[in-house]
Each structure stands twice: as structure tokens, then as C-alpha cells.
Amino acid sequence: MGRKENPVVRKVPAVGRLADFPRTWRATAGLTYVNLAHATGWSAATLRNAASGRRPPRRDVVRDAVTHCGGPEQEAIDLWRQARYHQRLADRPRPQAPAAHLVRTVVDLAALVEELYEKSGAPSMSEMEHRTDGRLGHSTAHRLVTKRTIRPTGTSSPPSSTPSTSKNPCAPSAYRHGTG
């Protein structure tokens, strides 16, 4: 029997809920961190950190730990996405994006794209490219995430937050792909 675990850190509640999940499944399976490490290929320290609640671990660590103990993979990934979203929001607060049907400006659209990216777990550019079978290239994904992709025609700087009164600011014909 190993030593008693430290309590879960609950500074960001969603990260604490994520930490509880693999702990519960590991206890249900009756495994120690050393046993689980041998079975998953992750170190015991990595698995302990994943269940600490200090920061969201890598998605693969949570998925492997939970599924090896008989837990539901999709629920583990959903909890991981929520934890990562809330941790990143705590690290870098930002205003809430408008609902899609309320987007009226390029600034609104950029905020919505950022929100969707964050709620998806802030995937890497390579992962985004892979998820779209290469239809969304690495550099295009980067420009979307960094808000460098849509600019009013004929400008080289990011759009202002003031919508144009002469054209619909979200009309596709009013914008071109930026060069970064």
C-alpha cells in the first residue's frame, strides 16, 4: 500500500474535478500509481501530477489512466477539455464571446473563433490540421488562432472594433485572407 495521497488542489474547480476522475477510477481498479505506470507507459510521477489538481495534464495521460482502469474515455476527454478551458481562462482572462448568431463585427468573429478554439481544448496546429484531414493547413490554423486571418480588403493591420456602416462587416466579399 502506497502513501496517502495529498488532497486535490481546487484553485480552478474544473481542474479539481478532472483530478478526481482518474483518482476514482484508479481506486476502483485497485491499482497503485506504480502499477498504473507500468500498464500505461507514463511515469508514476506523471500520473500523480495528473491527479493533483494543480494544472490540467496532457489529454493522453488522463485518457490512458482512466481507460486502463475501466473508465469512460469520452467522459475523461470532456472533463479534460473543460479543465483546460477554465485553467487557460484563469491564466489569461478575456471577455466572453458573443453567440454565433450575434456576431456583427470582425472583432466579434475573432472572439468567437478564439472561444471555440479554447473550448476544444486549445489543440495544437498539427492536431487541427489532422482533424480536418489536411483541409485546414498548419499556417491557416495558426492565423485563425492568432486572429491574423481575416482583415478588411486593402488593409495590412488588424481591423478596428468599429463596424463599417457601408457594408456588412461579416460579408465574405468584404474580407480577404491576411498574410500574417
Image (cartoon, rainbow, N blue to C red):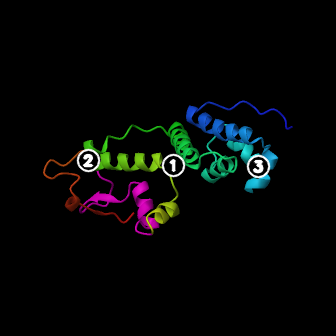
Say what secondary structure mark 3 lies in.
helix
Which residue extends farthest right?
Answer: 1
Q: CA distance from mark 3 to mark 1?
A: 25 Å
Residue appearing at x 77%, y 46% in the figure = 45
Which residue extends farthest bottom?
Answer: 134
Q: CA distance from mark 3 to mark 2?
A: 50 Å
Say what secondary structure mark 2 lies in.
loop
Question: What residue is pinned by disc 1?
Answer: 121
Task: Tell me the magenta residue range.
Answer: 134-159
Q: Amino acid at mark 1?
A: Gly
Badge 2 crowding class, 10 Å Cα cut-off, few under 14, some 14 to 19, many 20 or more, is: some
Rendered position, 127 above or below 86: below
Label pair 2/1, CB-CB below 8 angstroms: no
Q: Earlier in the sequence, mark 3 or mark 2?
A: 3
| Residue 155 located within the stretch drawn in magenta | yes
In the rendered image, the quadrant that contains the C terminus is bottom left
Say what secondary structure mark 1 lies in.
loop
Q: Earlier in the sequence, mark 2 or mark 1?
A: 2
Rendered position, 59 above or below 172: above
| Residue 48 located within the stretch drawn in magenta | no
Q: Earlier in the sequence, mark 3 or mark 1?
A: 3
Where is residue 142? Give x, y as percent: 45, 60
Q: Amino acid at mark 3?
A: Leu
Specify the label residue 36 is tagged with: 3
Question: What residue is pinned by disc 2?
Answer: 105
Image side of residue 150 versus residue 127, left or right: left
Closer to the camera, 30 or 108? 30
Closer to the camera, 65 or 47? 65
Where is residue 64? Give x, y as percent: 66, 52
Is residue 176 visible in the rendered structure shown here? Answer: yes
